[in-house]
Image (tube, rainbow, N blue to C red):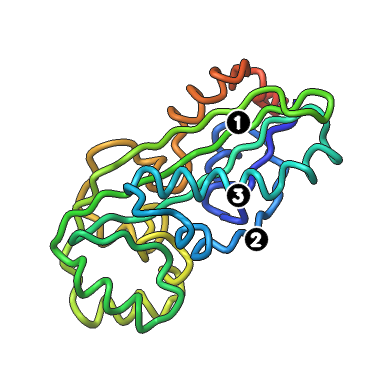
Amino acid sequence: MQFVLASQSPARLALLRSAGLDPAVFVSGVDEDAVAAALPDPSPSELVMALAAAKAEAVVDQVAAAHPDAVVVACDSMLSIHGQMVGKPGSPEVARSRWAAMAGATGELLTGHAVVRLDGGTRAKETSGWESTTVRFGTPSAHEIDTYVASGEPLQVAGGFTIDGRGGWFVDGLDGGHTSVIGISLPLTRRLLAEVGVSVVDLWQPPAS
């Protein structure tokens, strides 16, 4: 059975590879703003799960054609802070203003997961879930924020920060799953895989000889 990651995130891919998998990558290209706009006043958890489900739905037919026996995993992350849900900044100006507001504050990083199992090219089972991790941000100086934004790293990641890259210097602590903050929760993914009848250890690559 092929593990398929419905995401172009290099951090998610690197994490899964380090955890023993060799995912095939199918990029969904979902218009996240359009999906969010179509939801009537969703809760934060409903929003990230709906976005993850949309990403899985966008690739499942392509996956079925290429890998008839597969499990598709899609994820979406957003940061809840100061009463707002924020995704990828997209521009240096937005990233800079967000960091000015996040410095010294605490937020909740929510990650939604959607899993679809394909048997013989046909949907067999599907499930979804979400996880929240508390993030305690440090207080970088204006110069540090400017330099971090100029690196380009925060522009295309949820909340405008990473913990497995340069942004990790400015995160004082986490309460919850750190892999969820990277973009895909390994414990939650393991549980969701089990719900569709797949043991993650059966997807592991053999150790190098």
Residue 201 seen in the figure: no
* Rendered view: 91 above or below 205: below
Image quadrant in which you'd find residue 40:
bottom left
Which three-letter amino acid code belongs to the residue tagged 2? Gly
- Split into 4 quadrants, where in the image is the N terminus? top right
Q: In what element is the residue under mark 3?
A: helix
Mark on residue 11?
Answer: none
Name the front one of labels 3 and 1. 3
The numbered mark at residue 29 is 2
Task: Give the mark nearest the N terminus, 3 or 2.
Answer: 2
How far across and how far down the image is residue 132, in percent?
Answer: 31, 40
Kind of residue indicated by mark 3? Lys
Q: Which residue is mark 3?
A: 55
Quadrant of the drawing holding the C terminus: top right
Q: Residue at 29% across / 42% down in the picture?
A: 133
Mark 2 → mark 1, Cα distance in angstroms: 26 Å
